[in-house]
Each structure stands twice: as structure tokens, then as C-alpha cells.
Amino acid sequence: MLIAQQKFRPWNGVFLNDEFLSSPDGARRIVVQMMRLYEEYSSEILIEAPGVRSEKDWDVVESLLRERDDYLLSSLVGRDVVEVGDDKMDEKQIGKVNKVEESRTSRDDDDDDTSGSTTSKRRKTSTSESTGDSLMKSNLPPTNLPSKILNQAAIVLFHSHDVRLHDNVALQMASHHKHVVPVFLWSKKEQGPWGVRGCLEVVLKDALSNLDKKLKQYNLRLVCREGEDSSTMLREICNECGAGAVYWNKEHTTESRIREETYRTVLQEIDVQSIECQSSLLYDPSSPSLAAGFHGGGHWGTLMPFKKTCEKQLGMPRRPIPRADTFFMLERMKGPNEWPASKDVEGLNIAMINGNEEWDKPILDRFPMSEDDAVANMNTFFQHGFAKYERDRSRADIDWSTSKLSAHLRIGSLSPNELYYKIEDSNLDYNDRKTFSRRLIWRDLAYFHLNSFPMMRDTSIRLHYEQTEWLSGEEEDARFNAWKTGNTGYPLVDSGMRELWETGWMTQSVRMVVASFLVEYLRVNWVRGAKWFHYTLVDADSAINSMMWQNAGRSGIDQWNFIMSPVAAWQDASGEYTKKWCPELSKLPKAVLHKPWEAPTQVLQAAGVVLGETYPTRIISDLKAERSKSVEAVLKMRRANQESNSDRGYDMITLPDGKRTVVFTKKEFRIDPQGNVIKEATQSKKSSSGISKVKVGKGRGRKGKKALQKKLLRQEAAGKK
Ligand SMILES: Cc1cc2nc3c(=O)[nH]c(=O)nc-3n(C[C@H](O)[C@H](O)[C@H](O)COP(=O)(O)OP(=O)(O)OC[C@H]3O[C@@H](n4cnc5c(N)ncnc54)[C@H](O)[C@@H]3O)c2cc1C
């Protein structure tokens, strides 16, 4: 009717060409073309109210917007898109589960780490924020559901790794539906020992509450349900909303994999699509495939080979969705006509504080958990710490020596892709930014390890290390209790453990000191330390935590090739850190602050310190003797497991595909077939694997030595295949 009216009584000053006036299809084509053009130039479209009066009119507008978006996606992503809204599409083609994988951009150049500056130039040319361009970089796959399903509600599940609206792939994908229902399902029972508990509950609750507030700004909300079994709740909520699809971001943990499998089954039973996305890591940890043996410049599953493999096999990480796009998505998104029943976030049985203790306050004061807080935190770090990260990152006494973004990354209030490209697009020289950038690859690596060894949270990856003898009984309990309460008598260790208890956080270098102390000197099994950390950390992440504890406990893919001294305390060169967390020592001079037992009596008196009264005496005093016992325990276990010993005395482990591989093993643990520690000044003439005689001792530079060691390992790995 409108076309006929415009043909015969056109509005003044409005030109409509013949194609537009020829038919509704012609008009639609022109409108979509114009919308594309606006979108390309980032112009916002205002929809005039008199023209859109009813639900039906609005449906037309939405279908136009979808058509525009799908065109942009198909042309930019450069692949065939199933027409959104094409009901003729055979529904069987859709498949019950649409796995939304990271799409892969091929890179034929090898990103050698040393060539970082050229890489950075190449990356920096591609930072245009124009919508279409960024959609291409973000590589979001188009939704390929027929309009029948798109016209039904989509449920978007939020868990504990993706509590954000921006750069949330599941939410972005679901936004193609007519109605969207954001949902959080909480089952305390399903958490288990490595799920959300302790301090993590505090930050999760705050993040959920802030998410709900933000959604309300867009007339949306977070529907929260609580019960024993989340899949039953999911089924109920799907039925109540008449949902056509459920979207979620995979969490990549051992328990989430089981839960997601149950969801898929339940949804299939009620004929609802499950759409799984990936948004909490740079790469899906099940995607890269590492060959056994000495691989790409390092042992299996270590950082640089992993990074290079990901880049080669999967391309560079996905670019984040531009913030403007998130805004427009939320502006357009509509909730259901009637919202399903929901609990308040505050009413959920998460981090319930009994009594007046308010132990959550210092945690939330330090780590407020909204998306805005995450961005503010990130920006402050980039202003004050980023440029000095290479130099200061081990210092616990310098503010912003590290980013303190771990809780946001863990809960997902900050997208790792956003942080990654904030680093990569910065003006900082490659050598000044590379370590910080690699921290995000470490995160991914931890999930790769967990994906490969699901039992690693409490069982040694080097399985034979399960036989290591640790301290036991009352002595073990006494040492462990002193450690966890910050009463070991070693000020740096106690400062770290007190900071952890009070605020849920410690910088990495102090985490290493306390972990090393527990394992190497107190001789307590690393699993107890890992459990305590998991309970007390704001960033408790069962993949990263166990990777680090396994390495500290020597049974991981890596072994720390150093021992952190509890006394040297270069992490607290000024002493301010210890003075803050052990205030009873604050009047001690710096020279004895980290070893008060060495202070003369008058110095202690002047500082008001009475060891054993105002501050504990040392729980162990002969550090050297304790360390020797630790080394002896490992050697004893290794001697009893010669079949896991390579020709050069390295540990061998079995990979998930059944292949055996060599993993780095500290020199002090390398033994020959007779069980003697290998003294490695000169390699033996020719080992059974055919390694030729090479001098690796004196007379070669550090680089030369490293190169030779690599060569030997390569030869060895080749021999083992
Ligand atoms: C024994 C031990 C246990 C740990 N447990 C956890 C844990 O449960 N959760 C956790 O997030 N980190 C853990 N870490 C790693 C690291 O200590 C923290 O990520 C870091 O201290 C957080 O502070 P930040 O955000 O200022 O880090 P930054 O130095 O600013 O690093 C930026 C981000 O990179 C990631 N990252 C940094 N270091 C590592 C690492 N070694 N491995 C993987 N990712 C890393 C984190 O997400 C971090 O937020 C552990 C380290 C040790 C030694």
C-alpha cells in the first residue's frame, strides 16, 4: 500500500527510484542496501515511530537488520552463509549441536618469536574499528538457524567464566533471536572440590549482581535459578520460555565438560538446539595438536611450542567485537514478553556471610567485579604499570607491578581477546610487551594441560611421582597450618599467606615463594597447597592453579628449574610489603626484616619484637637439611621407576594418545640406569639412543650450551619415537 501511495502521491523531497517502486521485494532490496551502506560508515539508523506501529512492523525491521548483518558477515568472513530466515532449509541439515568453533585464518609465515617487531607492524595495520572490518577480524560465525527457530526465544547461559556482555560470543550469537533470556543456573552440589567455592564465590556473586544491573539498563535481566541439578532447571526454563535454542560459552574444565554433555542430551530430548561457543580463552584448548617429542623449540606442552602451534594451526587469536557493536546489539535485544520467575542474585546461596564478620569486604574493596571495574583496572595498569612490566613484575612492594586482572579474567568480566589486542596494538616495543602478552598464552596453556590430563588437579601428571614420600602425620599438619595462617616465622612467606587470606590475592613471585617453601622445605604434598589456594584465591582457576602447583611439586609438564628462597626477598626490596602484612615487624631495620632470627637482641627489643610471642619462631630452621630430604625423596622414587627414565635421565610421560615423550627434568634428579645422579660435564660417548659425544661443559657460552642441549634433546626424541 505504501509503495502504491509513494508511486502516485510521492512525499515532497523524497526520491524513490523505479526499482524501489516496482515491488515490495525491490523496495526491500534497496532498503537493505542502504542499511549496509550506513553500517559500513558506522552510521546509526533511527527507526521512525509512525512507520513502525505494531509488533508485525517491528518484525519486518528486525528481519531487515538480520538480512543486513548476514550479508556483511557472509561477504566479510568470505564463506557461504545459509540464508538466515530461509525456512526452505532442511532442518536436518542443521544438526542438533552447532559447534561454534574459532574460525581459522591461515598463516603461512612462521611467527618466530624473535621477529616480533615485524609481526607487530602487520598486526597494527589491521586495527580498524569500522564495524564490518572488525566483524571480519572477530571471525564470528554467522548463525545458520532457520527463522522458525530465530523467532523463538534464545536462552543464553552464563556460568562462572564468562560473566560479561561485551565480547561474549554466545550472547552475540543469540542476539539474532527475536527474544533473548539471559540465565544463570546455580547448583552448589555440582561445584565439587574444584568448582566455584570460597573466595571465588564472593567475586562471582558481585559480578552476577553487576551483570544484572547492566542488563536492566537495556530492559533485560538475569534470570537466576537455584537447585540441585542444573539440567533439570534448564529443561524447565526452556519449556517456560518456549526456547528454540540455548547458547553458552564452553568452560573447558573437567566438570563443565560433563555438565555440558548433559545439557546437550537434555536439550536434544526436548528438541531445542544447543549452541556452544568459545569466549573465555584465546583458543579452544581441544583444538591445537602437539606432536610428541621435542617439538618446535621446546618440550611437549611448554609455552613457546604451544604458542607457535596455536598460531600455525588456528591463526592469530580472534579480534574482540568492537564496543560500539555490543552497544547496538544490546539496544536491539529484546527480552521475552513475560519474564520467567527468578531469584535475586543476592538470594542465591553463594558466598552467604553468616554473622557480622563481613570477611568478603576487604576482598570486594580490592576487587570490585563489574565490567566497568575491569576496564578501569586495565586502563590504570596500562597507564602506570604496563611499560615497566618487564622490569617490575616480580616486585610485591610496587603498586601496579602487575595488572591484577586475574579475577576479572577468571570470572570473565574482562575478555582475554580484548586484553590481548590492547597489548598487541599498543605502541610499546615488542621486547617490552612480550612477557605480558605471553601471560595470556600461559592461561590457554593451562587449559590445554587440563584438557590433556583431566586428573591433574590432584594427581601427578608424571604419574610415578605419586609414589614420592612426603611428610605425614601431626608434623605435616602442624607445618601446613602454620603455612596457611601465615605463622611460619619466615616474614615473606607469612606476608604472602596473610595477604591471600585477607584479600584473596598475591603477586605471582610471592605465590612462587610460598609454593616452593611448602613443597621444598616443609615437604608437604603440593595437593594440599593447591586446595588451599583454590579455596582462598579470588582468581582460583583450577587449570592455572594446578599447572603451577604441579610445576612447583615437580610432577607437572614442567619443573621449576629454581628454588625460591624464603629469605632473600628481592620481591620486597624496599621491605614495604612485609611491613604491611606483618606489622608486628615494621620497626625492624631492613637488613633483618626478612630474617628476624638474625637480629641482635637489642635490635629486636628496640623494634618491640619478641620472637615466639609477638611474632612466631621459625617452624623449621635448617633449610638446607630439609631441602636435601626433599631431593632424596624424589631420587628414591625415580630410582624405583627406571622405566620412566630416559637415556639422559629425563622423565618420560605418556600422552593422551598413548605416545611417550620426554619432559624437562632438573639436573639434580637426572639419574643413570644404576640410579646414580648424572654429572654432566661431558656427555657419554654414545648412548643407546645414538647421541654422539658433545661437550656441553666449560668453554661454551650460555647460548651455545642451550643450543647443544636442544640438539641433544631433539636427537633423543627422534630416537624415542
Ligand atoms: C602456585 C601458583 C598458583 C597459581 N594459581 C593461579 C590461579 O588459581 N589463578 C590464576 O589466574 N593464576 C594463578 N597463578 C598464576 C599467577 O600467579 C596469577 O595469574 C597472577 O599472579 C595474577 O596477577 P595479575 O593479574 O596481576 O597477573 P599479570 O602478571 O598481570 O598477568 C596477566 C594475566 O595473565 C594470566 N597469568 C599470569 N601468570 C600466569 C601463569 N603463570 N599461568 C597462567 N596464566 C597466567 C592471568 O590471567 C593474569 O591475570 C598461580 C601461580 C602460582 C605460582
Image: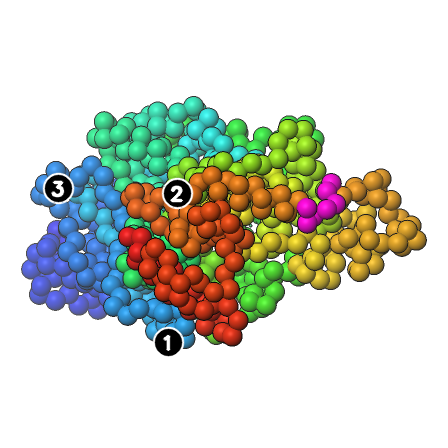
Does mark 1's beta carbon lie closer than 8 Å to ligand 1? no
According to the image, label 1 marks what residue? 118
Q: Nearer the viewer, residue 547 or 399?
A: 547
Secondary structure state at the residue bearing disc 3: helix
**Residue at the image point whose x is 53% and y is 62% from the top:** 379
Secondary structure state at the residue bearing disc 2: helix
Does mark 3's beta carbon lie closer than 8 Å to ligand 1? no
In the shown orientation, is residue 368 left or right of residue 280?
right
Q: CA distance from mark 1 to mark 2?
A: 46 Å
Q: CA distance from mark 1 to mark 3?
A: 43 Å
Secondary structure state at the residue bearing disc 1: helix
| Mark 3 Cα shell of 10 Å, populated few (<14), some (14-19), many (≥20) | few
Dot in front, 1 or 2: 2
- Could you tell which of marks 3 and 2 lies nearer the N-terminus? 3
Query: Residue 29: horizontal and vertical position, in percent?
Result: 14, 59
According to the image, label 3 marks what residue? 93
In the shown orientation, is residue 12 left or right of residue 278?
left
Magenta segment includes 448: no
In the shown orientation, is residue 626 left or right of residue 370?
right
In the shown orientation, is residue 526 left or right of residue 96?
right
Q: CA distance from mark 3 to mark 2?
A: 51 Å
Hey, what amino acid is under mark 3? Gln
Hey, what amino acid is under mark 2? Glu
| Residue 11 falls in image quadrant | bottom left
| Mark 1 Cα shell of 10 Å, populated few (<14), some (14-19), many (≥20) | few
Task: Give the residues drawn in magenta, as a range.
Answer: 619-625
Residue 643 is marked as 2
Up/down of 493 relative to 74, above or below: above
| Residue 664 falls in image quadrant | bottom left
**Residue at the image point whose x is 35% and y is 28% from the top:** 231
Query: Residue 436: horizontal and vertical position, in percent?
Result: 50, 62
